[in-house]
Amino acid sequence: LAMDVLEAPGTPLPPAAWWAAGGVGALASAAWPPIFPPLVLAVPGALIGLQLPIAMRPWLGAVAGALAGGALGALVREWVAALAAGGIGAAALLGGAIGLLAKRPIAVELGGHPMVLLAAWSVFAVSGAAFHAGRAWPSEGAKGRGDPASPQSSGGPSSSKSGISSFR
């Protein structure tokens, strides 16, 4: 049955299959967070691969596209994680702002111009990603060194530079 669905041209998968796949991906990402970036880029890779069948079989294109997208996600994992965090934060910010301004005329005006909301989301998402980019997964070498923003290296209360003893 699965092969008939995958090989039939134009036959969509049932929505329950997409929900199940999303749930499995979410559980896998929660159990092991480094798998999140490859999974995130494997989805569009599979969708692109469906449009480029290999040997007249769309499912082979989907598998190849998912592998290519997953490999790309593994290579740029820090940027994928940073963009995901920035995008989710931007959506939360705009959702909260619209919720607070719901009874004001500006919210009605913004609701009539979705491109303005998309532009604002884009700006907030990119700025959030730029903030998170270096902090998504610290490199192995950075674990041994002190973070420049940490109180220990900047003369904070637990630093010996400050002349004040720590309250540990």
Image (cartoon, grey):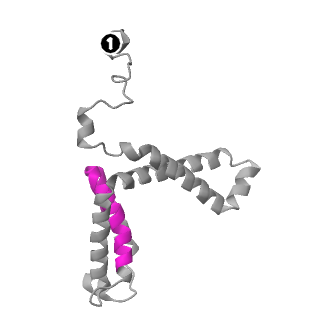
Residue bounds of the magenta highlight = 20-49
Residue at x 65% of width, y 58% of height: 116
Q: Magenta stretch containing residue 33, yes or no?
A: yes
Secondary structure found at label 1: loop
Q: Is residue 162 above or below residue 25?
A: above
For this rendering, which residue is in front, 163 or 15?
163
Residue 7 drawn in magenta = no
Inspect this view and state whether residue 1 appears.
no
**x and y, in percent, of residue 12 in the image:** 39, 81
Q: Quadrant of the N terminus?
A: bottom left
Q: Amino acid at mark 1?
A: Ser
Q: Position of residue 115 (x, y in %)?
A: 64, 62
Q: Position of residue 122 (x, y in %)?
A: 55, 56
Q: Residues within 10 Å of mark 1 (few under 14, many from 20)?
A: few
Q: Nearer the viewer, residue 114 or 23?
A: 114
Query: Which residue sits at x=59%, y=50%?
Result: 94
Give the residue at mark 1: 166
Residue that appears at 41% across and 50% down? 82
